[in-house]
């Protein structure tokens, strides 16, 4: 992998969608142990998965992983903490704003 070139690969994955009272979530697990690194992007192939209320849906899919270049990996590692801190600035309260 070069400093500015990107590579693409595919991996089998399991997509789990939960639309239940106790949990609202979506997860992707790579079935072959593939890992993603900072700056990589993942796109799961196939139609949209819908789970009705109260359901947990699991489907086998293929994911296309676009690996970040070395330069993008370095940039993501260097600036990732700042982006995380932006998330920490949010707070939730019961107070109504006027």
Image (cartoon, helix red, strand yellow):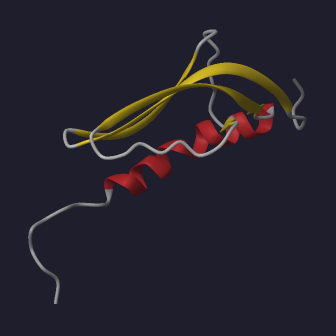
Residue at 41% x, 42% y: name it: 51
Location of residue 3 in the rendering, given as x and y in whole percent from the top left corner: 87, 32
23 sits left or right of 13 in the view: left
Quadrant in the rendering for residue 86: bottom left
Q: Nearer the viewer, residue 65 or 71?
A: 65
Given residues 41 and 17, the one toward you in this image is 17
The image quadrant where one finds the C terminus is bottom left
Return the residue nearer the eye: 30 or 41: 30
Residue 67, how many percent across, how many down? Answer: 76, 31
How many callouts does the rendering have?
A: 0
Residue 83's x, y, as percent?
49, 51
Q: Is residue 80 above or below residue 31?
A: below
Q: Nearer the viewer, residue 16 or 68?
A: 16
Indicate the quadrant containing the N terminus: top left, top right, bottom left or bottom right: top right
Q: Residue furthest left?
A: 94
Looking at the image, which residue is at 23% across and 60% down?
Answer: 91
């Amino acid at each position: 992998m070069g400093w500015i070139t990107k590579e693409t690969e595919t991996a089998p994955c399991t997509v789990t969608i939960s639309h239940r009272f106790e949990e609202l979530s979506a997860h992707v697990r790579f079935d072959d142990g593939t890992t993603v690194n900072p700056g990589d992007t993942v796109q799961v192939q196939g139609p949209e998965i819908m789970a009705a209320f109260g359901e947990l849906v699991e489907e086998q899919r293929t994911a296309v992983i676009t690996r970040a270049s070395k330069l993008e990996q370095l940039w993501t590692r260097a600036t990732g903490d700042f982006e995380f801190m932006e998330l920490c600035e949010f707070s939730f309260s019961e107070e109504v704003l006027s």
